[in-house]
Image (cartoon, rainbow, N blue to C red):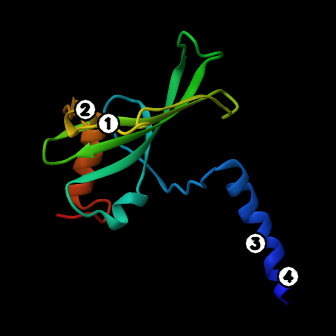
Amino acid sequence: MKKKFFIPLLFAVIPVLLFGQTIENHRWKKLENNTGKKLWYDVSPFDTLRGDRFDVWILEVHTPPLKFPGIEGEVYRSKTLYSVNLTTVRYGIMKIHYYDVKNKEIYSFDYDTPPPPTDAIKYPYPVLENSPVHLIIKELFSGKNGGKN
């Protein structure tokens, strides 16, 4: 009986140990906006939101696809991790992943390695009205997401 449990567990743990990959479990919700952009955000962090800071992934479909110097191919989707400070109403970009038409990652960058030394550097951008981060904050406080009032 122990062998039956141990073998599947071993196959689940080995790739994580060997490659250092973490499994991301996102729960995507469509982000309603007036711009016509196709946006989704991960509602997972809002289940346990405490304090005035949170991180949130935003997934965007790009039509037409984007082109960047130094990135081979066209970018059809991007997934960006934003870090938001509600006290200062500012945010920063922590990570970004770009995907091609087949949803294969073609480029990624981690802006948080090493971590910035101060909050002024971590949260450099103001939250502008009707931006994706602003829309998420509105949803969070309107209670549509089961969030706080």
Image quadrant where one finds the N terminus: bottom right
Is the residue 65 above or below the residue 88 in the image?
Answer: above
Going by the numbered disc 2, the residue's amino acid type is Ile
Q: Which residue is mark 3?
A: 9
> What is the residue that sits farthest to the top in this orientation?
69
Disc number placed over residue 4 in the picture, else none: 4
The mark that comes first in sequence, 4 or 1, is 4
Identify the element where label 4 is drawn. Answer: helix
Q: Are marks 1 and 2 in contact (CB under 8 Å)?
A: yes
Q: Which residue is depicted at the point 24% across and 36% down? A: 123
- The span from disc 1 to disc 2 (Cα, nearest Å) is 6 Å
**Amino acid type at mark 1:** Pro
As drawn, the residue found furthest toward the left would be 87
Q: Amino acid at mark 3?
A: Leu
Q: Characterize the local packing of mark 1: few (<14), some (14-19) or many (20 or more) Cα atoms within 10 angstroms.
A: few
Badge 3 or badge 4: first in the primary sequence: 4
